[in-house]
Image: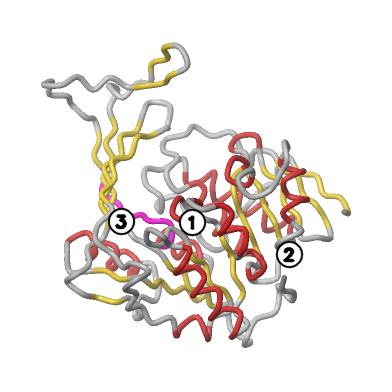
């Protein structure tokens, strides 16, 4: 377990490298996508052979790592995105948007063997969504041509949604980070959660761990968010457990923060809310903000994202005024 979370390698703004897959997202909204409850199942009818109208189509880019890179850039940090992309339209769209946002994409590997992911997202009338996902063609642990050199000079690295069997890649990234004293925030996605026991074995090299309640219960025991956070502190210096509209619990080993909803807003689309929360936290924590301040911004960032279509449109910019929220802080 590592210490010294608020120091970084130079006197400039913290530099954070986000590593992981990117996608092109197409969002479809329609009154026809209305959830119906029948027994224990919630579903939307999409009748075969019927031509259905949609009210709105939105093209955006996504992918956990590209989403968090935009939060860092909009908060004035030095943000870098690293992955392998091709020359397909989706790859080009991802790079173009990151470039417009001021994210450094110079380390991205461009090769026609690779293709970005592509998702069609059906947004229900309550803001929930069904995602039709094409993984694209990307690197594998057995064939990893990425140059991780930029990790050596970074203050933080944020790996997420890596390739299938991604724990091999994650282990390689953590080894480089430890060697060069680069701090690590981990908000594991599906590929990393496929082997909870193996993931748990890597946590000694993680500085900040952020997971939702159900995910954290795959790693440590606990029935409440507070119990899960306290148990997770045996593995990492900072632990954060979110529980959707029920709020979040976080601790840095010194204090424990329990927070509710930042604001009750109409939910348009929940895509990217988790990325916005985790990256919002790190964008403040990396600059030396307190646990309380970091949680407030993370909650505000996540709340803003769900009011827009897509994972990036609602990400807050530097200097956005914040307000107080239901929050309690106490010493451990």
Residue 275 at least partly seen: no
Q: Which residue is mark 2?
A: 237
Of marks 2 and 1, the one in the foreground: 1
**On the rendered structure, is 11 left or right of 3?**
left
Which residue occupies 12% across, 24% down?
51
Crowding near the residue tagged with mark 2, few <14, some 14–19, many ≥20 C-alpha atoms within 10 Å: many
Query: In which quadrant is the N terminus drawn?
Result: bottom right
Q: Earlier in the sequence, mark 2 or mark 3?
A: 3
Vertical position of residue 150 compared to residue 315: above or below: below
Which residue occupies 60% across, 63% down?
282
- Between marks 1 and 3, how big is the CA–CA gap? 18 Å
- Res 27 → quadrant: top left
Q: Secondary structure at mark 1?
A: helix
Q: Which residue is mark 3?
A: 23
**On the rendered structure, is 41 left or right of 3?**
left
Vertical position of residue 174 compared to residue 24: above or below: below
Which residue occupies 53% across, 66% down?
75
How far across and down, in percent of the image, does residue 174 sit?
55, 73
**On the rendered structure, is 295 left or right of 244?**
right
Q: Main secondary structure of the magenta part?
A: strand
Of marks 1 and 3, the one in the foreground: 1
- Between marks 2 and 1, how big is the CA–CA gap? 20 Å
How far across and down, in percent of the image, does residue 227 sit?
77, 43
Q: Which residues are magenta?
A: 58-65
Q: Earlier in the sequence, mark 2 or mark 1?
A: 1
Which sits in the foreground, 283 or 181?
181
Q: Which residue is mark 1?
A: 192
The reply to whether discs 1 and 3 touch (Cβ–Cβ < 8 Å) is no
Which sits in the foreground, 158 or 27?
158
Which residue occupies 54% across, 63% down?
318
């Amino acid at each position: 377990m590592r210490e010294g979370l608020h120091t970084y390698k130079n006197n400039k703004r913290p530099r954070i490298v986000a590593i992981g897959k990117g996608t092109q997202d197409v969002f479809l909204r329609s009154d026809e996508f209305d959830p119906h409850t029948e027994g224990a199942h919630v579903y939307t009818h999409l009748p075969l052979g019927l031509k259905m109208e949609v009210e709105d189509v939105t093209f955006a880019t996504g992918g956990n790592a590209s989403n968090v890179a935009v939060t860092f850039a909009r908060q004035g940090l030095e943000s870098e995105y690293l992955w392998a992309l091709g020359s397909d339209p989706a790859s080009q769209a991802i790079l173009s948007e990151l470039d417009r946002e001021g994210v450094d994409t110079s380390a991205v590997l461009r090769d026609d063997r690779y293709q970005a992911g592509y998702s069609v997202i059906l947004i229900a009338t309550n803001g929930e969504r069904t995602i039709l996902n094409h993984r694209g063609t990307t690197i594998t642990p057995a064939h990893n041509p990425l140059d991780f050199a930029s990790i050596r000079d970074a203050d933080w690295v944020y790996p997420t949604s890596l390739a299938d069997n991604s724990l091999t890649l994650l282990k390689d990234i953590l080894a480089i980070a430890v060697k060069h004293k680069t701090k690590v925030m981990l908000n594991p996605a599906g590929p990393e959660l496929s082997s909870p026991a193996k993931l748990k074995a890597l946590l000694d090299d993680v500085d900040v761990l952020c997971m939702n309640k159900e995910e954290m219960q795959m790693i440590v025991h606990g029935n409440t968010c507070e119990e899960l956070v306290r148990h997770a502190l045996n593995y990492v210096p900072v632990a954060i457990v979110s529980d959707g509209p029920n709020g979040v619990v976080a601790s840095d080993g010194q204090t424990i923060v329990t927070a509710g909803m930042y604001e009750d807003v109409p939910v348009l689309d929940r895509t990217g809310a988790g990325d916005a929360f985790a990256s919002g936290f790190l964008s403040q924590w990396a600059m030396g903000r307190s646990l309380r301040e970091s949680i407030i911004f993370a909650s505000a960032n996540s709340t803003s994202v769900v009011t827009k279509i897509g994972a990036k449109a609602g990400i807050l910019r530097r200097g956005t005024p914040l307000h107080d929220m239901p929050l309690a802080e106490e010493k451990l």
